[in-house]
Amino acid sequence: MNNNRSLSRELSLISLGLIKDKGDFKLNKLQVEEIFESALDSLVNHCRDELDTCEVELENASQKILESELHEGVNSSFADVRDELKKSLKKIEIVMNTLSVTLDFPKLIVSSGQINIREDVKERITKIINNLTIIDSDIDQVMDGWRLKRLPRIDRDILRLAYVDINYLSTPLAVACDEAVNLANKYSDMQGRKFINGVLRRLQTAKLQ
């Protein structure tokens, strides 16, 4: 269930990126379904790209190890060879961690055909679209001198999804914030992650008051 919810949030985030976030507008069921399918295609393509990248990184790391072995005892000290091996092994570790996450997606993609995930994504998208002005205004109130519209689109949507979790879907605060942080770690940059963390803390405080 938790994996399904995480997948729903990720597909919701990708879906929101396909929709304008200015002005009042409505989407019919067919449009929402088309957006969902496009988001799913994007996620699948992202996984394929990750796998391709991992393949290249593994080849590079293997080549580095081979070069280190060839240089050993020739014109490199043992310390140099050891350092090169450490770097290569670290690279392999990173690649394997990426693979472990990416290879988990096929079963999640299969589960995306389940009605509950599709309906959950549609609900999240619809609630944001139908309440965009209110959501953005409430987030602005905890932005501490900033405005939501000044943030990159991906960061705005991560915060909107967290707001919907907290205020519309009765998701526990800790869960909603953890899921938002996970999305930020994957899709935002370092500055965005720090900013989102700060806003999430203030959203938590506002909700508890």
Image (tube, grey):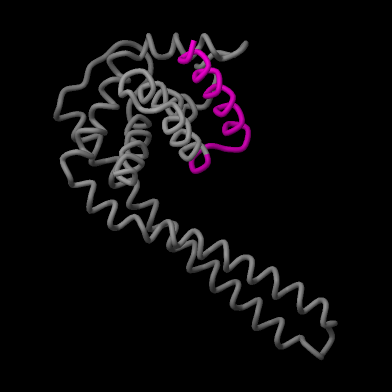
Quarter of the image holding residue 75? bottom right
Q: Give the residue drawn at x 43%, y 36%.
A: 179
Is residue 181 or residue 150 the one in the foreground? 181
State which quadrant residue 83 falls in: bottom right
Quadrant (top left/top right/bottom left/bottom right) for the N terminus:
top left
- Give the x, y percent position of residue 85: 70, 75
Per the rendered image, the range of residues in magenta is 185-209
* Picture layout, residue 22 above or below residue 159: above
Q: In percent of the image, x 34 and y 47: which residue is there?
A: 43
- Residue 74 higher or lower than 55, as above or below: below
Residue 19 picture location, percent across and down: 32, 26
Given residues 22 and 202, the one toward you in this image is 202
Does 204 lie within the magenta span?
A: yes
Question: What residue lies at 30% left-to-right and 19% top-to-bottom?
Answer: 129
Give coordinates of residue 205: x percent, y percent. 53, 16
Residue 50 place in picture, x, y as percent: 44, 57
Which of these two is toward me, 209 or 56? Answer: 209
Q: Residue furthest bottom?
A: 73
Which residue is at 58% across, 31% downward?
A: 192
Residue 69's place in the image compared with 198, above or below, is below
Q: Is residue 189 magenta?
A: yes
Q: Is 209 positioned to the left or the right of 44 in the image?
A: right
On the picture, is 65 further left or further right than 208? right
Q: Is residue 149 left or right of residue 43?
A: right
The kind of secondary structure the magenta stretch mainly shows is helix
